[in-house]
Image (cartoon, coloured by chain):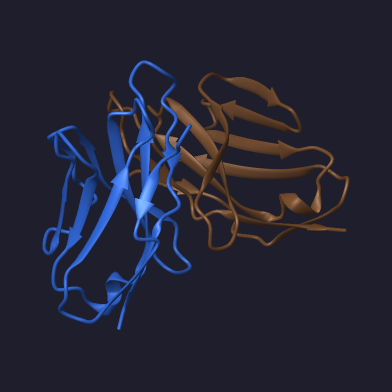
Amino acid sequence: QKEVEQNSGPLSVPEGAIASLNCTYSDRGSQSFFWYRQYSGKSPELIMSIYSNGDKEDGRFTAQLNKASQYVSLLIRDSQPSDSATYLCAVRGSGGGADGLTFGKGTHLIIQP
Amino acid sequence: NAGVMQNPRHLVRRRGQEARLRCSPMKGHSHVYWYRQLPEEGLKFMVYLQKENIIDESGMPKERFSAEFPKEGPSILRIQQVVRGDSAAYFCASYGSGGPPEQFFGPGTRLTVL
């Protein structure tokens, strides 16, 4: 049974600070990792993907992957009130091909003005 | 550049009726995935389809649920004899072969069973 674990929050961060979101996964053979942002009542929006160990930066977002520790994180720099949302960690398994994703339940992030 | 399209956006059914949810993938995408999000729950994978083929239906309930992706037209998720527990948001995502394995989601269909 593949599992993806996230702290449900809420995680409250002051505007302008760094928000740090964490995720662990159980399938050691997983190859692809994604962060989605979901506003209430809306669909998930892909914001970051990462496939190899280390850091990947895109604007204010940095994804970090440590396959040995089975750990993925997302850093949001200069947090804005518009970043307030639920952040979903998703993992694609080791089965090869275009597998369905396994999602965590999400972390609810609140950016305080 | 149209994204993933789903319709209807909202669907109300009475217990015992059938629900049909439609999904048109992004242009050039031939892989379609269906996910369900129950209230206060995470997204759960249901089924993965390519044109005319079901590739993985391991997340699909064994009874009342079926999916297809015909050669022409949208993918259809069909729920027969709906029950109140089927009330949820159903999302479709698509992916294009040859690119990074990123799935892009449609706006979802919110099903309410009375």
Question: Image height check: is B49 above or below B39?
Answer: above
Q: Residue at x 81, y 42 (%)?
A: A18
Up/down of A40 relative to B83, above or below = above
Residue A96, given in percent of the width and then of the height, sits at 29, 23
Q: Which quarter of the figure is the C terminus of chain B placed in?
A: bottom left
In the displayed structure image, the side of residue A63 where residue A51 appears, left or right: left
The colour chain A appears in is: brown
- Quarter of image, res A40: bottom right
Figure check: B113 above or below B5? below
Quadrant assignment, res A26 = top left
Which is more toward the observer, B41 or B52? B52
Rendering coords of residue A76 (x, y %): 74, 39
Residue visible at 16% across and 76% down in the picture: B17
The residue depicted at 40 percent of the width and 29 percent of the height is A30
- Residue in the foreground of this view, choosing between B43 and B22: B22
Relative horizontal placement of residue A70, taking residue A81 as reference (left or right): left
Query: Residue B39: percent from the left, percent from the top?
Result: 44, 69
Viewer-proximal residue among A51 and B76: B76
The chain displayed blue equals: B
Relative side of B12 to A41, left or right: left
